[in-house]
Image (tube, helix red, strand yellow):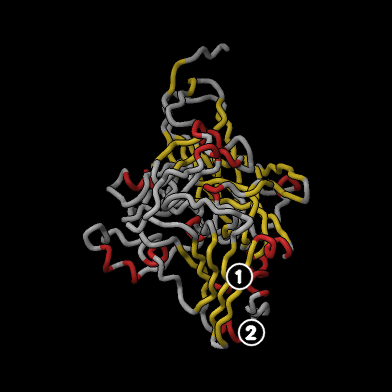
């Protein structure tokens, strides 16, 4: 353990604890109560999950800077960039879902013990992120803007390193392929705002990476260094974490497997049932609206969500809600079928946000197992059963709940 700081300077005043299930106090890790997540398409900041690997740095934005290093066959350049430099670049906003790779880890822990924070389905949130494109920062530092340039003939990566200590290394760092960052459609940002306000410390103040469509482990907070290099990050969180190891790998022998499998990048297709909430009782013979969220990675759209009341034997389409955001305006769009103007989504455009969905039960049966599964535009769907892995990551099995019921008066 490399942490040398204490936790005496945590931003408790920014944490509305009633909205969270606290999974660990030091480092602070808390997931949203899932029934609150479906109240709005854009997750309010005080309901957005909080994932940390060490004490929260207390940085002075007026003094903050990060280094931008570019290593190619042509040589090495280094620049220092502050908030004023970022502000001079063209600013963008993107509504994007952030999902921890350990979301729904509790489902894998139910099979066999795993190594990681025991998360439910509350480590996915959908926010409006603002800042400049990382691509523009790198171009200003000398990285060729043209993807036909010779530098892209060999694989390069962009490593992000954070200020502060981390529990498993002397700092947190991670990397993504350079070609992904340099594609302007991928909207990788150096973000300084969240939901229209300056980032909170828990969310990376003063600047963080936003990498839509990619697991949250690559969205590095409290940026200290961005470096273009010809290799992946050597940091613990890239090489010895956030990988799907085969079921044969466990605590005793995982060391022999880490180098054989790739670091996780794109999110998997996913859905979760948020209402009924855990422990909520449904009234038999009365209507009820099941609600949840769904998402996918790599820019692939969720094209439908299906719901079952018999555990997955039969399925019906749910209503899906998306948002088309323009400058200064937000509007909801409902898609309940696959024809006509009600489904006027551009399937060819990248999709970075989640969707919310709803399914009306006309009459709740005395016993039912409600299940949900999403499909994306790539034809991917959720597997029927979870496959265990040592780190408990990327559980996207069909989501099932069996809510308790009580007898009501059918005449009401």
Q: Is residue 403 above or below residue 103?
A: above
Q: Is residue 115 above or below residue 223?
A: above
Foreground tag (1 vs 2)? 1
| Circle nearer the N terminus (1, 2) | 1
- Give the residue at mark 2: 149
Instruction: Kindly identify which numbered label has been placed on residue 133.
Output: none
Query: Can residue 270 be seen in this snapshot?
Result: yes
| Residue 94, image x, y percentages | 67, 55
Judged left or right of residue 42, residue 277 is left
Mark 2 crowd level (few <14, some 14–19, many ≥20, 10 Å Cα): few
Residues 377 and 61: in front is 61
Image quadrant assignment for residue 2: bottom left
Q: Where is residue 62 shown, x and y percent of the image? A: 64, 56
Q: In this picture, is 83 found above or below 332? A: below
Can you identify the residue that label 1 sits on?
A: 80
CA neighbours of label 1 inside 10 A, class few (<14), some (14 to 19), many (20+): few
Question: The residue tagged with tag 2: helix, strand or loop?
Answer: loop
Q: Residue lying at the far left in this picture: please name it.
A: 252
Measuring from the top left, give residue 154's x and y in whole percent: 52, 83
Q: Which residue is depicted at the point 50% across and 31% down?
A: 18
**Could you say which quadrant of the image residue 347 lies in?**
bottom right
**Position in image of residue 391 (x %, y %):** 34, 55
Whole-number angstrom distance, CA of label 1 to CA of label 2: 25 Å
Q: Quadrant of the C terminus?
A: top right
Classify residue 106 as left or right of residue 214: left
Q: Are marks 1 and 2 in contact (CB under 8 Å)?
A: no
């Amino acid at each position: 353990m490399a942490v040398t700081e204490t936790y005496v300077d945590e931003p408790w005043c920014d944490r509305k604890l009633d909205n969270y299930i606290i999974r660990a106090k030091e480092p602070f890790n808390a997931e949203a109560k899932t029934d609150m997540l479906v109240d709005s398409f854009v997750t309010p900041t005080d309901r957005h999950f909080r994932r940390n690997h060490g004490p929260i740095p207390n940085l002075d934005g007026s003094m903050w800077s990060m280094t931008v290093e570019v290593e190619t066959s042509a040589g090495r350049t280094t620049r220092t960039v502050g908030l004023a430099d970022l502000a001079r670049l063209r600013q963008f906003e993107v509504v994007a879902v952030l999902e921890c790779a350990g979301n729904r880890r509790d489902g894998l822990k139910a099979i066999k013990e795993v190594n990681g924070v025991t998360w439910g389905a509350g480590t996915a949130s959908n926010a409006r992120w603002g800042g400049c494109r990382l691509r523009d920062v790198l171009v200003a530092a000398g990285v060729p803007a043209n993807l036909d340039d010779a530098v892209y003939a060999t694989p390069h990566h962009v490593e992000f390193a954070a200020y502060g200590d981390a529990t498993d290394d002397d700092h947190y760092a991670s990397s993504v392929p350079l070609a992904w960052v340099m594609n302007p459609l991928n909207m990788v940002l150096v973000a300084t705002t969240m939901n229209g306000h300056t980032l909170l410390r828990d969310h990376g103040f003063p600047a963080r990476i936003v990498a839509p469509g990619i697991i949250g482990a690559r969205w590095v907070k409290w940026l200290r260094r961005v470096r273009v290099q010809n290799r992946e990050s050597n940091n613990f969180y890239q090489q010895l974490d956030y990988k799907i190891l085969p079921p044969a790998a466990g605590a005793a022998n995982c060391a022999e497997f880490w180098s054989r499998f790739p670091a996780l990048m794109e999110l998997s297709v996913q859905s979760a049932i948020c209402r009924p909430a855990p422990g909520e009782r449904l009234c038999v013979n009365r209507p009820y609206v099941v609600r949840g969220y769904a998402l996918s990675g790599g820019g692939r759209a969720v094209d439908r969500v299906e719901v079952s009341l018999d555990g997955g034997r039969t399925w019906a389409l749910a209503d899906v809600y998306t948002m088309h955001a323009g400058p200064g305006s937000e509007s909801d769009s409902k898609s309940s079928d696959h024809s006509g103007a009600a489904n006027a989504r551009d399937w060819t455009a990248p999709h970075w946000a989640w969707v919310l969905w709803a399914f009306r039960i006309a009459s709740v049966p005395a016993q039912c197992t409600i299940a949900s599964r999403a499909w994306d535009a790539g034809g991917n769907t959720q597997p029927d059963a979870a496959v265990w892995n040592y780190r408990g990551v990327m559980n996207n099995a069909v989501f099932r709940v069996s809510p308790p019921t009580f007898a009501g008066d059918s005449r009401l």
